[in-house]
Image (cartoon, grey):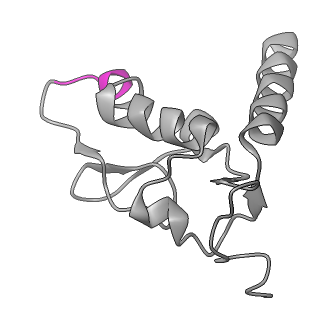
Amino acid sequence: MSMKRYGAATTAEKSTRDCLDPWFFAMLNARRQLQPCCWHPPIGTLEVGASLNDLLEGPAMRELRRQLLTGELNEHCQKCPARSLATPAELRARLERSLAEEAASE
């Protein structure tokens, strides 16, 4: 894996990661902690009687999505070894295409 592409520091132009995980992927571990990807620490815990959707659409996940779309990355996303750099416009365009494809397949 080339560190020039993955794990590289963001720049003024490419200030975000090419990451759609917070929209299409999540991990729930054995402690019922929700992780938005393999590399990010948990952003919440699924409490007994709570809805998984409440976590997936809750404030922490919405904030992570906002950070990715604006290029205001948290420390975990800044250091991500799994996703290459992108501009916010590139990420937004990719997200819109992916959401449209998913809607068309339903």
Q: How many marks?
A: 0
Residue 56 seen in the current view = yes
Q: Which residues are magenta?
A: 50-54
Give left or right: position of 68 versus 104: left
Q: Main secondary structure of the magenta part?
A: helix
Residue 39 position in % (x across, y down): 49, 67
In front here: 57 or 3? 3
Residue 25 position in % (x across, y down): 58, 43
Residue 38 seen in the current view = no
Residue at 41%, 64% (x, y): give it: 75
Residue 45 position in % (x across, y down): 21, 44
Quadrant of the rendering where the C terminus is positioned:
top right
Residue at 38%, 22% (x, y): give it: 53
Kindly indicate the quadrant of the structure image that contains residue 54.
top left
In front here: 97 or 75? 75
Q: Is residue 33 magenta?
A: no
Residue at 44%, 65% (x, y): give it: 76
Vertical arrangement, residue 32 with respect to residue 70, above or below: below
Residue 42 position in % (x across, y down): 31, 55
Vertical arrangement, residue 84 with respect to residue 25, above or below: below
Quadrant of the rendering where the N terminus is positioned:
bottom right
